[in-house]
Each structure stands twice: as structure tokens, then as C-alpha cells.
Amino acid sequence: MTATRVLVLNSGSSSLKYQLLDMRDSSRLATGIVERIGERTSRLKHTALTTGETRETAGPVADHAAALKAVAEELGRDGLGMDSPELAAIGHRVVHGGSSFTEPEIVDDAVLAEIERLVPLAPLHNPANLTGIRTARSLRPDLPQVAVFDTAFHTTMPESAARYAIDVSTADEYRIRRYGFHGTSHAYVSRETAKLLGRAPEDVNVIVLHLGNGASASAVRGGRCVDTSMGLTPLEGLVMGTRSGDVDPAVIFHLTRVGGMSTDEIDTLLNKKSGLIGLCGDNDMREIRSRVDEGDEQARLAFDIYIHRLKKYIGAYYAVLGRVDAIAFTAGVGENAAAVREAAVAGLEGLGLAVDAGLNAARGDGARIVSPEGARVTVAVVPTDEELEIATQTYALVGASHDLT
Ligand code: ADP
């Protein structure tokens, strides 16, 4: 029997998201999430897409090991168990791969040790990712586990884009540079955009705008990332749901010296209490848009700041690329908020950028073009699929290094 299934695991600090895919046709067999791991009120929601059945269970799940065992049981009830010979590999999302990981890796002790060494760069995410890998490994020690890094796609950035202009020896000692995140999404969306244009990725220059709760932009030349808006951490760049994006670093000194705030307080302020929620109390773009429509000035200002930043990055990446074939909007806001797409390119006709009002407002599931016919730059909505990208990269790697038949 050929093993064609890939289980994708995304382990957060208190959650475990999973999807089981069949790589023969990239179809989903099951999907689910365990939330509030380590609390009394944990909850598992599992959907078997083979039957359409959804089951929810509540009750304490002590840790990630217990969570993955519960997931394995749920999969087993649908005949999709982790002990199945059809399972080819488990693909793990790993947030920080530093400069070392430029490609996905089959996990061995050396890879685990390197992910561990990178913990100081992603103190919340990498430990959770490691726990997920270790747990999966103990459940199926015989199965290849693949680590797919959020940073890997951005390792092609030239030094001129990746380095901050700070003292080189200090930067090197503390590994301070721009790593970028959402890499699987930027990789997937830039490739899908080329497909939409009917051209090879090597021939196309794309600006990808991943606008979810977290948000990042990237400049992709011929399939390779040459710049991205997130930096050492996912805090830099665009205005996000709860993160500030770019600020003058002196804001931090000021808050320390004049505001008497601690490092942890400022960290929380900039990561959790800023961005849209800090500006207007809401981080959901639907809510903000309806407040704008009702004439709410605070929501209007938040929206305007969000768009102003977005436009600056479009302009910057236009300049970085020199020639732009397409701009792709993706993730929750990018795929759904027509008003954001319209405002982001408004006034940029001189750069060949515009949306067609009808096409932009129309709803649709797949990748679609929203710029007017014959436009110099194609503006597109390209739904992202990070799980599929992780599964595809995992399967490609495992298929290349193992005889699966
Ligand atoms: P993440 O994966 O970063 O948590 P998503 O990519 O799922 O986020 O995006 C979530 C965000 O997408 C929500 O916070 C909301 O602002 C926005 N969103 C989702 N649906 C819509 C919609 N129909 N219109 C406008 N914004 C939307």
C-alpha cells in the first residue's frame, strides 16, 4: 500500500491545531483543534471531512502529549488513525528556523537541538512546536517527522534587506536580523499568483499582502523572497490586529524612562494592546468597517492608519522589485475585506494599480483577479492555505528520501 496521508500539526502554547490530508488529490480527511491545553476547561473539536461529522469534547487535557493522544483517538474513531500504514509523515509548523533552516527538514536529534537553540528568538512559539514534535515522535517513532519553518521562505533575502543598520558585532552576537514570518503563506500565495497569471513563478514579480490578525507583506522576485515586513520577531511592519507594527524604537526608551514601564509591560503593550485594538478597541475588520459606516471617528482613524501603512509597504516593495506583475491579497482581511483592497490601491493609478469596483466587491472562493481588464499590474485575491503548503513540503521531502511503497 502506498502511504499518501500527511498529518499537519500546528502546536501553539496552549493549543494544538491539526489537519489530515490525502496527498493524492490534496483533499482534507479530518481537521480539528484542542484548545486551552493545561486548563480545566480544555476543549477538542474534531471534524471528519470523510463523513461531515463534527464531535466536541470538553474536559481537562493536561499537556500536549495528552492532547495529541486525544486527537489520535478521534482520528481512530473515523478509521483515520495515526497507526494507519497510509500515514506517510507528520508535518510540523515551526515558527523560528533562524538562519540555519532554509528548507523543511526531516527531524532528527540534531534538528531538535537546533530548534531548541533558537528558543530565545521565539520564546513563546518554538517550545510549543518542540513539544508537539517530541510527542508525535513518541507516538510514532517509526514515522518521518518534518519541520516546516515559518522563516525559511525569507532566507533568500539579500543582506541589504535582512540586516538592521546597527553595530555589526552586537547584531551578530545576539543574532539580530530580519527573519520574517508567515513564510509558508508567502511561498504558497506567490506561487498560486503566478499560476493565476498563467506564468512560471520564475518569471513573475509579486507583492504578497498577508492580512490576517497578524499581517505581513513580502516582495517576491521570480519565486524568491527579496524583502518582508516582519523582522526579528513578528512585531515589525504592518499595523495588525493587536500589534503595533513599525514604531520608532525610542518609544520603548521613552516608556521606560518617562513612563516607568517594565520591559514585559511594553512587550505586552506593543504585541497585545496596540494595532487596531489599541487604536479603536476592536481588532476585527468587519466590526471596524461597520463602525466606519456608522460614522465612528475612532474606527475611521484606525482604518486610515492601517491603510496608510499598507500603502507605504506597497510603494516600498514596488521600488524594491522595480517591476511588479501582481499584488496578491490574502488571509482573513485580504481575502474578505473589499474596502481594504480598494483603499490600499486608491490613488496608485500612476503605478498601474487599480481595482475594478464590481470584481472587487464580488464574493468568490478561489483565486481571482480584481483589477480592471488590461491593467498593467494584476491585483488579485489569492486564498492562502498554510496547512496544504506544509503537507506538500512534507510529502515532497519524505517522498524524495523514503521508498513509500
Ligand atoms: P489569523 O490566522 O492571523 O488569526 P485570519 O487570517 O484568520 O487570522 O484572519 C482573521 C481576521 O480576518 C479577523 O480578525 C477579521 O479581522 C478578518 N476577517 C475575517 N472575515 C472577514 C470579513 N468577511 N470581512 C472583513 N474582515 C474579515
Image: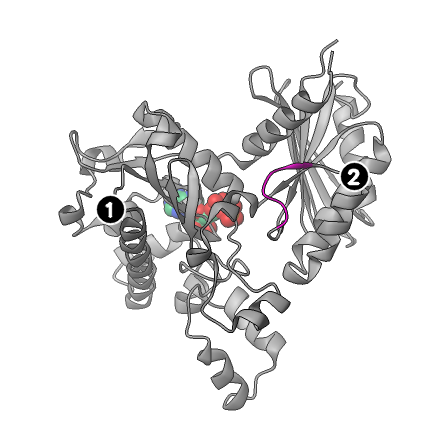
Q: Which mark is in front, 1 or 2? A: 2
In the rendered image, residue 103 lying in the magenta stretch gets the answer yes
Residue indicated by mark 1: 342
Residue 182 vs 235, above or below: the answer is above
Q: Main secondary structure of the magenta part?
A: loop
Judged from this view, the residue extending furthest toward the bottom is: 258
- What type is the residue that disc 2 sits on? Asp
Q: Quadrant of residue 300?
A: bottom left
Q: Looking at the rendering, in which quadrant would you find the C terminus?
A: top right
Q: Quadrant of residue 88?
A: top right
Judged from this view, the residue extending furthest toward the left is: 350
Q: How is the image coloured?
A: one colour
Q: Nearer the viewer, residue 367 or 313?
A: 313
Residue 108 got which mark? 2
In the rendered image, residue 116 lying in the magenta stretch gets the answer no
Mark closest to the chain's N terminus, 1 or 2? 2
Q: Quadrant of residue 143?
A: top right
Which residue range is magenta in the image? 100-105
- Identify the residue at horizontal 83%, vertical 30% (top origin): 140
Q: Nearer the viewer, residue 358 or 122?
A: 122
Q: Looking at the rendering, in which quadrant would you find the N terminus?
A: top right
Residue 272 vs 329, above or below: the answer is below
Q: Position of residue 102 (x, y in %)?
A: 58, 43
> As drawn, is 335 to the left or to the right of 33?
left
- Identify the residue at horizontal 22%, vertical 38% (top origin): 377
